[in-house]
Image (cartoon, rainbow, N blue to C red):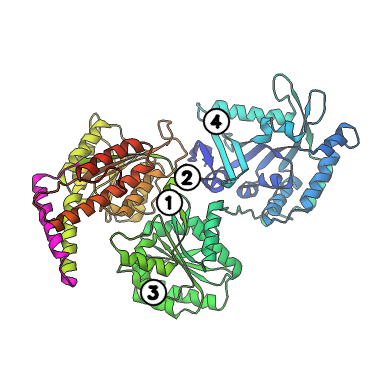
């Protein structure tokens, strides 16, 4: 395999990517040579050059490294007056700096580079920068020079294909902490080759000590690594490369660390309400890390609503060097959990044992019995925690969980105050919030346009709708379980009339005709609409919109679903037609359009669907464009208020309309086209006798 077979993006940043796994480790595992220039010559910056080098070192890769000197005023005075030479001061500063290192990460990476140096796989040069009179520049003068601010690297594979990167590497950002942002260019792509050549020329310029610019304003003097530093490094070199273990510890953002502190201060209980894309999973794993520091002999139960989320959790845990066991399709899961508890009771392993399960399994009598009998500390992480409050899953919320963490964009249960209160009491309330508005402002998510599109029921649908409304009004006044049951049945029938309304398909067809080149689009519809939606897409002119469907049972194998998503991301399909199976926890950053035809009216469901298209995608689409925003089309039924309605019917109907308007206002308030949306919503309010300025 060579570089040309890698799936690389045009740019990377540490907000949207794990830059080590997504770029450095991926590229370095195939590299034979690596050249890097930039960064001040300190022990920490020196160690940072080994980031991702584990496979490169094991494959006998060769590296050239250029670092920049930086002297304080006292150093410069000593050099410029001839008291000391630059090599002496570099050596003194290095030895002092290195003696103060306490961070194991820095030490391990320094030792890795020392092994390369000792075995002649690494060459190092140091750049001294002087003005045209020969005086060494101070730090203020160096800040104006590009090399001081930016790092550039070039990789070559065995076929001499080259990949370069250029930008901020390990930049300390006040908001994000350790921050990375860099562009990537490939030699085999004709549109990028000139930038590869430019990056290589820049490296050669510093390696050979050529002038920085055409005017010769600054003088570059490139010197070999001072002998004393080289000897100092070689002394710490491991005996063999088999001893080199480089692991980049994942780092949380400051706001995630705040969430963890809040959870700890709340007796290690609480709910994180964090918008899609802000790292709920990583923050939860950060909580595990904090417990490990106290005592690693505990169990973690991670509960998820879907199989794909269970797999995603397992993959994320691996990145933190945690193994996990998934109960799905494992007939022996109960025995494995009992065995794990026994191992932890004996303190036979120095780390927690993590079990990932579904809400269906978590709430069974067998599972809860095992948890209730356990004598070891157990941490419960309930992903999409609102699912834990459902009547059929509450059985799993037993008292034996010592530590409790709920995760959700919003945990309130729709039309279920009892379930919501149960969750709040069990998990200890919300201890941290990170809103969608904040996530967009901080660039974790893309901004979006929101277009509510209104239509009516057909005459036949209206008759059925009014019939069910009358039943709801009548049954809701009945006492006892029978009235409640009949009310729920009428509510469900009325919801299906709204969900499957014929006119929604006409709106959809008009929308598709107006945008025949629609791509990277998710279409949410009901099972009853699925076939007609696909026919509309297949019959689009001038050419069909190629699509695939994903429903609860089609395709049956979760791997086939993931393959569809991968091919969608690769532009093999322009649209995915789906129902609620794509609501929660699925990452499709390439998706940028969403058309909602069928919705339960549950605001949580809409929040989840919105999240699917708001994730950042930092690569480029096949046409070279970038994802700068998302677009959401919300097709809504607005029923007429009949003059024949009773007071109870009117009251109930208006409460439903208010609920729908509330959702629209929430969506519109932070949309790019907020003013336009709010104007349409005010018209709707007026239609139903609601004051335009009234807060819903």
Give how far apart the Cα atoms at labels 4 and 1 are: 39 Å
- Magenta region: which residues? 455-482
Task: Determine the residue positioned at 71% across, 50% down.
Answer: 110
Q: Earlier in the sequence, mark 2 or mark 3?
A: 3
Instruction: Please tell me whether mark 4 or mark 2 is closer to you in this view.
Output: 2
Q: Earlier in the sequence, mark 1 or mark 2?
A: 1
Q: Tell me the SS state at disc 1.
A: loop
* Residue named by callout 1: 275
* Residue named by callout 3: 367
Q: Position of residue 293 (x, y in %)?
A: 60, 66
Q: How many marks?
A: 4
Instruction: Please tell me whether mark 1 or mark 3 is closer to you in this view.
Output: 1
Instruction: Sort mark 4 into few (<14), some (14-19) or many (20+) by Cα contacts within 10 Å.
Output: many
Give how far apart the Cα atoms at labels 1 and 2 are: 9 Å
Q: Position of residue 495 (x, y in %)?
A: 19, 54
Q: Earlier in the sequence, mark 3 or mark 4?
A: 4
Residue 689: which quarter of the image?
Answer: top left
Give how far apart the Cα atoms at labels 4 and 2 are: 31 Å
Instruction: Sort mark 3 into few (<14), some (14-19) or many (20+) by Cα contacts within 10 Å.
Output: some
* Residue named by callout 4: 187
Q: Earlier in the sequence, mark 4 or mark 2?
A: 4
- Residue located farthest toward the top when viewing the structure as drawn: 215
């Amino acid at each position: 395999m060579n570089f040309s077979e890698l799936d690389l993006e045009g740019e990377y940043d540490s907000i949207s990517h794990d830059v080590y796994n997504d770029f450095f480790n991926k590229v370095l595992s195939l590299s034979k040579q690596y050249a890097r220039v930039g960064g001040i010559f300190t022990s920490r910056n020196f160690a940072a050059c080994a980031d991702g080098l584990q496979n490169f070192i094991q494959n006998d890769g060769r590296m050239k490294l250029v670092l920049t000197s930086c002297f304080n005023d006292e150093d410069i005075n000593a050099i410029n007056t001839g008291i000391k030479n630059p090599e002496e001061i570099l050596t003194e500063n290095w030895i002092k700096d290195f003696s103060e290192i306490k961070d194991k990460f820095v030490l391990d990476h320094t030792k890795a580079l020392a092994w390369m140096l000792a075995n002649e796989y690494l060459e190092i040069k140091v750049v001294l920068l002087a003005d045209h009179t020969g005086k060494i520049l101070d730090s203020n003068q160096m800040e104006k020079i590009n090399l001081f601010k930016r790092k550039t690297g070039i990789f070559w594979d065995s076929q001499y294909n080259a990949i370069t990167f250029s930008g901020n590497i390990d930049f300390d950002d006040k908001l994000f902490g350790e921050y990375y942002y860099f562009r990537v260019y490939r030699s085999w792509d004709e549109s990028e080759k000139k930038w590869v050549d430019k990056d290589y020329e820049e490296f050669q310029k510093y390696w050979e000590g050529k002038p920085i610019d055409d005017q010769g304003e600054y003088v570059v003097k490139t010197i070999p690594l001072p002998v004393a530093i080289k000897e100092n490094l070689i002394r710490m070199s491991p005996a063999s490369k088999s001893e080199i273990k480089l692991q980049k510890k994942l780092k949380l953002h400051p706001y995630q660390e705040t969430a963890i502190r809040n959870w700890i201060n709340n007796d290690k209980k609480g709910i994180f309400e964090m918008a899609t894309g802000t790292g709920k999973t990583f923050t939860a794993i950060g909580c595990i890390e904090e417990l490990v520091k106290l005592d690693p002999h505990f169990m973690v139960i991670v509960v998820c609503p879907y199989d794909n989320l269970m797999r995603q959790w397992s993959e994320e845990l691996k990145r933190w060097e945690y193994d996990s066991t998934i109960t799905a399709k494992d007939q022996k899961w109960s025995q494995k959990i009992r065995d794990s508890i026994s191992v932890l009771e004996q303190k036979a392993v120095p780390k927690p044992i993590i079990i990932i399960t579904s809400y269906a399994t978590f709430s069974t009598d067998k599972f809860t019995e095992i948890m209730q009998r356990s004598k070891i500390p157990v941490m419960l992480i309930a992903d999409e925690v609102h699912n834990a409050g459902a009547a059929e899953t509450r059985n799993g919320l037993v008292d034996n969980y010592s530590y409790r963490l709920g995760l959700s964009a919003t945990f309130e249960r729709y039309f279920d105050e009892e379930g919501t209160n149960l969750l709040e009491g069990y998990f200890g309330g919300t201890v941290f919030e990170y809103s969608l508005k904040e996530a967009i402002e901080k660039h974790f998510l893309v901004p979006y346009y929101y277009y509510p599109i209104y239509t009516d029921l057909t005459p036949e649908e209206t008759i059925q709708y009014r019939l069910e409304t009358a039943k709801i009004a009548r049954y809701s006044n009945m006492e006892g379980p029978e009235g409640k049951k009949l009310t729920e049945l009428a509510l469900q029938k009325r919801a299906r009339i709204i969900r499957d309304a014929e006119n929604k398909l006409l709106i959809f067809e008009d929308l598709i005709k107006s945008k025949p080149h629609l791509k990277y689009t998710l279409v949410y519809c009901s099972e009853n609409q699925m076939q007609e939606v696909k026919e509309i897409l297949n019959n689009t002119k001038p050419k069909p919109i190629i699509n695939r469907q994903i429903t609860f049972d089609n395709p049956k194998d979760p791997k086939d679903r993931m393959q569809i998503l991968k091919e969608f991301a690769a532009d093999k399909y322009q649209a995915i037609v789906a129902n609620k199976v794509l609501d929660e926890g699925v990452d499709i950053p390439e998706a940028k359009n969403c058309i909602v035809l069928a919705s339960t009216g549950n605001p949580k469901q809409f929040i989840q669907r919105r999240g699917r298209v708001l994730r950042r995608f930092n690569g480029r689409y096949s046409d070279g464009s970038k994802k700068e925003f998302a677009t959401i089309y919300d097709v809504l039924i607005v029923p007429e208020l009949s003059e024949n309605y009773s007071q109870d019917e009117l009251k109930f109907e208006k409460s439903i309309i208010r609920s729908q308007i509330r959702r629209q206002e929430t969506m519109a308030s932070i949309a790019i086209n907020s003013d336009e949306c709010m104007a349409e919503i005010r018209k709707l309010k007026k239609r139903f006798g609601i004051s335009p300025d009234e807060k819903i």
